[in-house]
Image (spheres, rainbow, N blue to C red):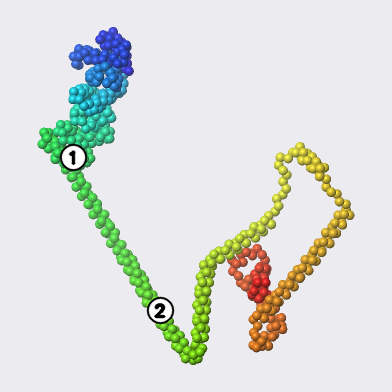
Amino acid sequence: MANAPSAGWAAADPRVLALAAQVTESKEQDIPLLLLKLKGILNSASLGSEESKKIKQDVYNYDLTQYCMLVLRQDHSRLRGGWATAAQLAEILSHCCVGLEVKEDPEEFHNKFLPSAIDNLLFLGRRLQARFIRTIKDEEKQDFLHWFQTVADAICWLFGGHIQLATCVLQNDHFLQLLITDDTETAIITMSILHSIFRVNSSVLLRVDEETLHSILDELVYKLSSTTNPVIGNAATKLLLLVAKFCKQLVKLLTTRYKGLKGLLSKQWTGKGFDRDLGQLLDLLYLEQSNGKGEMQRQHQAACIIQATWRGFQTRKRLKKLPQAVTTLQRSFRAKREQELQHLKKQKEDESLKLQMQLQRQRAMRLFHERQLAVLEIIHASQVNKYMEEMEGKSALTIQRFWRGYRARRNFHQQRQSLKEYKAAVVIQRAACKFLEKRRRRRPLSPWKDPKGSTDERRLALQQKVDDYIKLHPASQMSEEMSKELHVQAQEKLAEFLLRSRLDQRAAQRRETLMAQVNTDVELLMNAPGLAEATEKDLDVFLSRSIPVATKARQSHNTMLKYTRWPWWKKLGVEFEEDDVIPDDALHAELGTLFIGGNKSF
């Protein structure tokens, strides 16, 4: 709300004072019709006179202009007077604001009230435009168009009196939506508002933001390209001509942002009745294009000079490195030729080896066939079938032997790595376990520590619990004689157990010896020749026991030598033992094979 008058009550116009009282006391739907009386009050004084200024000052001081501005936001289809009243109020508001000199708080008037008035007027214009487009009857359309024209004139009159409002109009979203329309009549009126803005304040285009400027230019160019109406084309051409005349920077923007604009203007709008303005706009666009081409030629020449200098530098640098490059190329060529010669040589050697193997195979087959023929000539006819069967059996055995050997070697190679990893893991685990056990044995026992927090009361309570437990569970008492007798019995049983264990151990050793002797005798008997082929040496083997003993000694000696020659990683599991101790497993494994005779089925 505007500031209320402080010292001007006596000098106020009685008509304005009476109207302000009526508006204050009336209902909301009657206020628009009451505000129409301001038109007669304003028209009673000549425009620009002191009396007119005094009336406008009184109207503003009594907030009647604020009422007019607020009424514009209402839906006038439900109010008395309708949209015609709204258009007249818009005209009254603009006339009240132009020529008004606010003495108290002028910043609020210029920075808040006037922008709000412009926004409400544009909002009213949008409503009138929408209803004009939706209306079907011609009479109603003419009325809405007339009211829209009245609101547009009020907007032009308002920013004509306050030039700074031109920027507010262009940056207002309602104005851009008024401009972006396909209706011809309202579009012409909106472009007339834009034309008035450019006439009043031509520098406004440099004050608006880039997005707003691009939106306005885009819509003007779109109207030129999407319609054939000469009125729209004339208005859009005049607006673009004003933009181009104002600033060369905007001409450059037109040529770079809308590259097909010159062709569109010359082909579609030539001979439509506004060739003069169209020719001036095309001249400005072509002049800017020629200047741009000259600048592009200079840039092209500069780029050519830079490229020539760079190519010369690269060529000189390449010529300096040419001897080294030639040497590298020759070295690479010789290496590649040497590889090719070696490949050819290897290929020839392979071919010659293949040829030799083929010749040897043929020679062997020929010799085999010759021997077969010779044998067949020697052998009697009745023995030929038997001989062929024997040869087939030998051949089958040879094939089976080679196949089994191949399969065993293949399986061995497949399992070799896993077996090696398993043995290594076993050795590492054994060494780690022995090391941990040894360190566990060397670890000293932790000294006794008294329980923390024990007090005399706690000790007495624990002692009382111990005494109670002893009373409830008395221990069996034993005399000294009974203890000595029990000790003697334990000693006798221990001695009896040790004696029996020694006898059992000796009996087990005797049984193992007898079993080994039996196994040795069995092996000797199995390997012994028949009675017809037996000699005296064969008899000595059965009569003397020195040969098995010598064999056992020799094998034990070989086992110990083998152990001393083991690599370090094989001895890793026994590194914490003494050097002169031989593992019992290895020794028994070797000795066991001697006594059992290679057969562990027993």
Direction from residue 475 to residue 204 in the image, left or right = left
Q: Which residue is mark 2?
A: 353
Q: Which residue is mark 1?
A: 261
> Residue 35 appears at what percent x and percent y?
26, 15
- Asked if 348 appears above or below 311 in the picture, the reply is below
Residue at horizontal 71 percent and vertical 77 percent from the top: 517
> Residue 72 appears at what percent x and percent y?
28, 21
**Circle nearer the N terminus (2, 1):** 1
The residue most toward the right is 481
Q: Nearer the viewer, residue 518 or 116?
A: 518
Specify the quadrant of the image occupied by residue 428.
Answer: bottom right
> Residue 455 appears at what percent x and percent y?
74, 38
Q: Residue flagged by tag 1: what amino acid is it?
A: Leu
Q: Is residue 123 visible?
A: yes
Q: Residue flagged by tag 2: what amino acid is it?
A: Leu
**Which of label 2 and label 1 is nearer to you?**
2
Helix or strand or loop: what does disc 2 sit on?
A: helix
Helix or strand or loop: what does disc 1 sit on?
A: helix
Direction from residue 36 to residue 545 in the image, left or right = right
Residue at horizontal 67 percent and vertical 74 percent from the top: 596
Image quadrant holding the C terminus, namely: bottom right
Image quadrant holding the N terminus, namely: top left
Q: Nearer the viewer, residue 348 or 525?
A: 525
- Asked if 352 appears above or below 58 in the picture, the reply is below
Marks 2 and 1: CB-CB under 8 Å? no
Residue at horizontal 22 percent and vertical 52 percent from the top: 304
- Asked if 503 appears above or below 464 in the picture, the reply is below
Residue at horizontal 18 percent and vertical 45 percent from the top: 293
Count neighbours of disc 1 (C-alpha within 10 A) and say few if under 14, some if 14 to 19, many if 20 or more.
Answer: some
The residue most toward the front is 382
- Asked if 70 appears above or below 292 in the picture, the reply is above
Q: Is residue 110 visible?
A: no
